Amino acid sequence: MRNSWKWWLLLLFASIGLAGWAVSQQVGREPLVYDDEQKGLQNQIIIYFSHVVAENTPKGLAAQKFAELVEQKTDGRVKVEVFPNGSLYSDGEELDALLRGDVQMIAPSFSKVTELVPEWQVLDLPFLFRDEDDVCRVFTGEIGAELLEMLEAKKIKGLALWSNGFKQMMSTTRPLIAPDDFRGLRFRIMPSEVIEKQFRLLGGEPVAVSFDHVYRALEQHEFDGQENTISNIYSKSFYKFQPYITISNHGYLGYAVMMNQAFWDHLPKDIQQKITEAMAEATQWNLQESKAQNERELQQLKRREDVFLYRLSEEEKRKWEQKFAPLYEEFAKRFGARLLDEIRESEK
Ligand code: SIN
């Protein structure tokens, strides 16, 4: 008798375990129709939006803003669930997850898109943009639209270009001012041919490390420097390990906001329209807020005694630009000068 009890208990726990496993297998697979806690929402459309940065960053906040706008504009018919901090997928996994349809939206950095569409390397070129106005014109104008259209061939619906901000250089042991200061140092980079060559031209050794591993790699002293925006440096506390920050504004970190094409194609037309409107509003908000946030957090870093900030002079910048000239020549040789010329033209 006692033994038969044990068997029943074992069977019960095994069934619970199996049911739990089955539910976990569904997460991210078929979330289109979702019965929310509220009654009457059985036909709600759920969009899983995965990203890798903290919630309180230009991308994290814009994703939340977009989710709110979509919910308002569709009267709750569409719900955007945002998963920050790589909690669903790391930046090395998210593109594949989007293409498989395991997640419906992601917003990887431009560098990560270059693996799929090499022409996007143009956006990684150092000193491409002079200021945020240039960025805004390119992101929301014809060039931005043209870049987003290139994603269609890869079964991706490009929705918008979002901004984080200008990238700055940082290092563990010394300020990076003259090109020679980079010699012999190891730099964490995002996976990008242009960025890799940029550091090689400065005499550094680039190492591609995914964003979610940067903090741990810093703790283990795996590299001497990196480039990132003030908002990423601040929100992830990178300055605690690499306190020498050079305000160089040499590169730009932006994001391609994208949706799985098949998912988009299956959405009703009126929902597509509302999502487009919400994205346009969220993008305008992101372009303003990202600039303000980087400025605010720069002020916070300035107040810290353990952070050493240095602003590159115009003359010092010119020395970096001279070093980077081969990147432009190579881009034009490989892809033609048209895209570059159009960007330059739009900046006049
Ligand atoms: C991001 O902002 O999405 C990550 C940037 C990085 O990999 O440094």
Image (cartoon, rainbow, N blue to C red):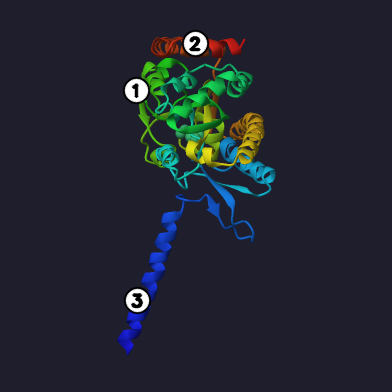
Under circle 1, the secondary element is loop
The answer to whether marks 2 and 3 mark residues whose Cβ atoms lie closer than 8 Å is: no
Label disc, if present, on residue 90 of the rendered structure: none
Residue depicted at x 42% and y 9%: 329
Q: Quadrant of residue 230?
A: top right
Work out whether residue 153 or residue 345 is closer to the camera in this orientation and state it.
Answer: 153
Q: Position of residue 174 (x, y in %)?
A: 44, 26
What's under tag 3, amino acid-wise? Leu
Going by the picture, which residue comes out furthest to the left? 3
Residue where numbered disc 1 is placed: 184
Q: Position of residue 75 (x, y in %)?
A: 69, 48
In the image, which is nearer the foreground, mark 1 or mark 2? 2
Q: Position of residue 206 (x, y in %)?
A: 36, 26
Under circle 3, the secondary element is helix
Under circle 2, the secondary element is helix
Work out whether residue 302 or residue 291 is closer to the camera in this orientation and state it.
Answer: 291
The disc, 1 or 3, on the residue closer to the chain's N-terminal end is 3
Residue where numbered disc 2 is placed: 338
What's under tag 2, amino acid-wise? Arg
Label 1, label 2: how many angstroms apart (C-alpha)? 36 Å
Instruction: Note whether 338 is above or below 251 in the view shown.
Output: above
Q: Is residue 146 visible?
A: yes
What's under tag 1, amino acid-wise? Gly
The answer to whether marks 1 and 3 mark residues whose Cβ atoms lie closer than 8 Å is: no
Instruction: Note whether 240 is above or below 135 in the view shown.
Output: below
Label 2, label 3: how many angstroms apart (C-alpha)? 69 Å
Q: Is residue 252 visible?
A: no
Label 1, label 3: how many angstroms apart (C-alpha)? 61 Å
Residue depicted at x 47% and y 9%: 337
The disc, 2 or 3, on the residue closer to the chain's N-terminal end is 3
Residue where numbered disc 3 is placed: 10
